[in-house]
Amino acid sequence: MAQKVRTRFAPSPTGMLHLGGARTALFNWAFARREKGTFILRIEDTDPVRSRREFEEAICEDLFWLGLDWDEGPYRQSERRPLYAEFLGVLQKKGLVYPCYCTQEELEEERHAALREGRPPRYSRRCLFLSPEERRRLEEQGRKPSWRFFVPSGRTVVVEDLIRGKVTFGTDDLTDFIVVRSDGIPTYNFACVVDDALMEITHVLRGEEHLSNTPYQLLLYEALGFDPPLFGHVPVICGTDGAKLSKRQKDTSIRFFREEGFLRDALFNYLLTLGHSFPEGKEILPREELVALFDLKRISRGNAIFDLARLSWMNRVYLRNLSISDLRKELASFAGVLWAKWERLLGEEYLLRLLDLFREEATTLKDLVASIDRSFQGGEVSEGEAKRLSAFLHAAFSALPENFFEDATRLQEELKRLQKASGLPPRIFYRTLRVILIGREEGPEMYRILWALGKKNVLAKLESRE
Ligand code: GLU
C-alpha cells in the first residue's frame, strides 16, 4: 500500500502570514485533505532574535480563519533542540561535519575576496585542515565552533521536482554549509531535514526560493540515512507590475485582506487559482470541489500573478452568493459593536433587507459597513427642500397601510404620483429623498429602498428632517 500522505506548513514567526505563505499552506493542506492524509503545522522559530510569539499566534489565527486546520502541531523547533543535538552527534560520529572557528568578519572578508576575483563565494575549508593543536588554541581564545557539513566534490545531486521536473546540482557548486551555529542553534536546512524526517513528511510543497536549499537537504538525508520526501517548488507570486510580491509587506498580509473585508471563502478560492488551474478553466467552485480537484499536475511552472482586481471580482461574486444568514454572520462579526447599534435602530429584519440591497454594489464587507453607516449619517442636501419634502411625504406615507411597502408595483406607481404632487422635478425629488433615507444621492431604486427600510423606519427618517 502506498504511504499515507503527510504534508506540513513550516512558517518562521518573523512576520505576519502573507499571500505567498498562505498559498503554500493551502496547497499543502488541500493536497493532504484530498489524499485523506495528515497536515502538520511546524513553527520554525530557531532564530531567537527575529522570532516572536505574537507572530506565531497571528499566523495560527489567520490559518484558522482561512479554514486551514492542522491535524498535528503546532510543533516548535525551539522546543526540539535536544533532537538536533542528537543528530549533530550522528553526523559527528560519521565524520561528516567539522568544527569551524571562523568569525563573521573573517567569512565576510573571504566572501568579498572571492567576489573581487570573480569566483563563486564558497567556504575556503580553512578550518577543515586544522590540527587538533590548532583547534585547542582557538578554543583557548574563547572561540566556539559552528559545525559545517563536508560536501563531497564531483557529485551530482538530482531533485525530482513534482512541479519543475528534474533539476540537477553539481556539488562543486555547493559549499560546506553550517548545520549548527556556534551558539548551538541549528540552521534552517538542518532543523528542517531532521524534522521532516522525524515527522515522516512525504511531500514538501514550498516556495521556489527554497529550491537552492534542496540539494543541501538531500545531502543531509543521505548522511543521516533517511529517505527524503518528494519536493514540489511552487513558482513565486508577482504583482501585476511583474515585481516579486514578497518585497512588499503590509498590503499583502492575510490580516490586511481580512481587515479590508474580504471573505475567507473568496480568498481561499482565489489562492487556489494562484499558480494552479482547475479543469475547463473553472475559477469559482465550492470549497469541497476545490479540494477534490486540487492536483499537483495542475500547478503552473510560470510565475503566478496576484491581481487585486481579480480577487475583488471574486469577492463580489462570493458576497452576492452568500445566504442571508451567512451574510449576517459575516457582517455581524466584521462590524462588531456597530451591528448592535444598527439592529437597535432599524430592527433585525429591516437591517437584513438593507444589507441584501447594499451588497449588490459592494466589493467587500468594509464597503457594506460604510454604506450602512452612511445611511444613518443623513448627508448633504438643501435643508429647505429636505424639510418640505419630508413633511409632505411623512403625511402621504403615514396614510398608507403597513404592507403597502411590500408591494413593488403599487409602490412604484405611488412614488410617481407623489413626485408629481410634490411639484419637484423627478431628479430633485429622488435625489433629496435618497439623501434623507440612505445618506447619498445615488443608489438602489427608490421603491427597493422603501421596501428595505419599511414604513416605520422611513417615517422615522422623514421625521428627523422635518
Ligand atoms: N521556515 C521556512 C520558511 O518560512 C520553511 C521552508 C520550507 O518549507 O522548508 O520559508
Image (spheres, rainbow, N blue to C red):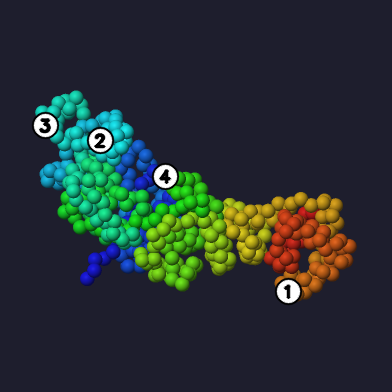
Check disc 4 and report the residue beneath it: 15
Mark with earlier residue (2, 3) = 3
Is the residue marked 3 within 8 Å of ligand 1, measured from its CB? no
Residue visible at 10% across and 31% down in the picture:
132
> How many residues crowd mark 4 within 10 Å: few (<14), some (14–19), many (20+)?
some
> How many residues crowd mark 2 within 10 Å: few (<14), some (14–19), many (20+)?
few
Q: Secondary structure at mark 3?
A: loop
Place residue 375 in its image quadrant: bottom right
Please, which residue is most extreme toward the top here? 141
Residue visible at 24% across and 38% down in the picture:
123
Q: Amino acid at mark 4?
A: Gly
Q: CA distance from mark 4 to mark 3?
A: 43 Å
Mark with earlier residue (1, 2) = 2
Q: Amino acid at mark 1?
A: Asp
Check disc 2 and report the residue beneath it: 183
Q: Amino acid at mark 2?
A: Asp
Q: Secondary structure at mark 4?
A: loop
Any part of residue 7 in sight = no
Q: Amino acid at mark 3?
A: Ser
Q: CA distance from mark 3 to mark 1?
A: 96 Å
Mark with earlier residue (4, 3) = 4
Q: CA distance from mark 1 to mark 2?
A: 77 Å
> How many residues crowd mark 1 within 10 Å: few (<14), some (14–19), many (20+)?
few
Q: Nearer the viewer, residue 63 or 267?
A: 267
